[in-house]
Image (spheres, grey):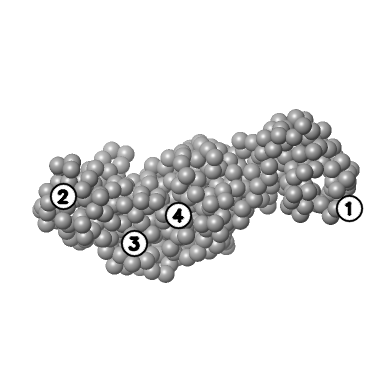
Amino acid sequence: MSDAPRSHAATSALLTDHYELTMAASYLARSMTATATFDLFVRSLPPERRFLVAVGLADAVDYLAQVRFTDSDLEYLRAGGTFAEQFLDYLADFRFSGEVWAIPEGEVCFPDEPLLRVSAPLIEAQVVETALLNTVAHQSAIASKAARVALAAGEHAFVDFGARRTHGPEAALRGARAAYIAGAASTSNVLAGKAYGIPVSGTMAHSYVMAFADERDALRTFARDFPSKAVLLIDTYDTVEGAHRVVEVARELADEGVRIVGVRLDSGDLGPLAHRVREILDRGGLRQTRIIASGDLDEHRIAALVGDGAPIDSFGVGTQMGVSADAPALGAVYKLVEYDGRPALKLSTGKVTLPGRKQVWREVRDGVLTVDTIGLEHETGIAGRPILAQVMVDGTPVDGRGTLEQARERCTRALKELPPSLRDLEARDVAPPVRTSRELDALVAHMTNEVR
């Protein structure tokens, strides 16, 4: 279970859309309580995306294990006058009692693949839809953006700086975790550090420098206060002059045992500035002092800096990653695929779904992902390893989610397994390496003929 702070929203069954409850009331009135299976998946990838990184499972499982309608929730629903007492009595004892299969956190995934497969009595499976979509889609979006940053940065570290621009406190917290899974070395979000055990790091703000009458005094004071960890921001007034002042301060404080760990550039043309600053630091004897760059960075700017050989050791990435600025919402959906043992499918234009309880088999050859096959769970003889794992039985979490570090390691491995065409950061038309099994295709064809 996550150690993250819990809000009422994190466990309340009222974190749902109103129509989930009206449907549930109708189901109960008609005694439609047989087992239903829903798939949570993404229909298509956002522009420039070649893959997604599955994240949010830990919070989703925690939610399902704890979801309740409180007395206050029931009074609120009663006051609305929409629901009968019989239904409210049912909600008073509402618990999730089903099973969940999921793509493990940190794993790469593609359109139409079930990130979660939820099987439970119909009302239970229906009511939790909104919360599951909210949890998994947001965190997977941030992790997928962070994975692109990781690909761009290569061997260079990057830090999550996104908290101040994300869409609310919980988004900042969950986003820091998602970014860490996808490769961020640390986060500036102290609460995320406490909650998840993520390394925290930071430098100083321009306001610190501006609070002193002289830039040298600011640099000198901060270095003395953090003699073995000081990272100095040098672009408040003039970046090149700031670098010279760092050398001056370092020489002055050397006898006190003070070590300048790094300098941060937060504005200007970062590539040329980094070269100039590196030259100044090296000439001043600060060859071990690292250069950190920040300032509205994304994977494209980072890739360009790395490609040009800019002497930047690590990157601070904020807004662009924290809100997944170029693709802030995934087209994630949660669709019924089986009810009471009967497969179900949707044939709406552009919104066709795949029926039945499914598994995904991944084939990797010589360390490179070649193809994923979506098939029915009982199928045999499909090449590759199954990637959906069971994470809940009878409403109880089971071993299978793994730890945060395991998710991070899984993501590192998965990114290395991607072929070059999927690692490419530019917008090109590249088909996802996904196919459906013959048996699943036959089921779709049969059901389509029956419906039409």
Could you give the CA–CA distance between mark 1 and mark 2, rounded to whole angstroms?
A: 75 Å
Residue 49 vs residue 64, the one in the foreground: 64
Q: Residue at x 46, y 41 (%)?
A: 168
Instruction: Give the amino acid type for the residue marked by disc 3 in the picture.
Output: Ala
Quadrant position of the N terminus in the picture: bottom left
The mark closer to the camera, 4 or 2, is 4
Q: Residue at x 53, y 49 (%)?
A: 176
List x then y, in percent, for residue 80: 18, 41
Q: Which mark is residue 255?
A: 1
**Going by the picture, which residue comes out furthest to the left?**
30
Residue 297 vs residue 243, the one in the foreground: 243
The mark closer to the camera, 1 or 3, is 1
Instruction: Give the amino acid type for the residue marked by disc 2 in the picture.
Output: Ala
Could you give the CA–CA distance between mark 4 and mark 2, rounded to whole angstroms?
A: 32 Å
Q: Tags 2 and 3 in contact by the CB under 8 Å rule?
A: no
Q: Which mark is residue 5?
A: 4
Q: Earlier in the sequence, mark 1 or mark 2?
A: 2
Residue 33 left/right relative to 148: left
- Name the residue tied to disc 3: 65
List x then y, in percent, for residue 152: 62, 45
Could you give the CA–CA distance between mark 1 and mark 3, rounded to whole angstroms?
A: 58 Å
Counting other residues with Cα less than 10 Å from the Cα at mark 4, is it few (<14), some (14-19), or many (20 or more)?
few
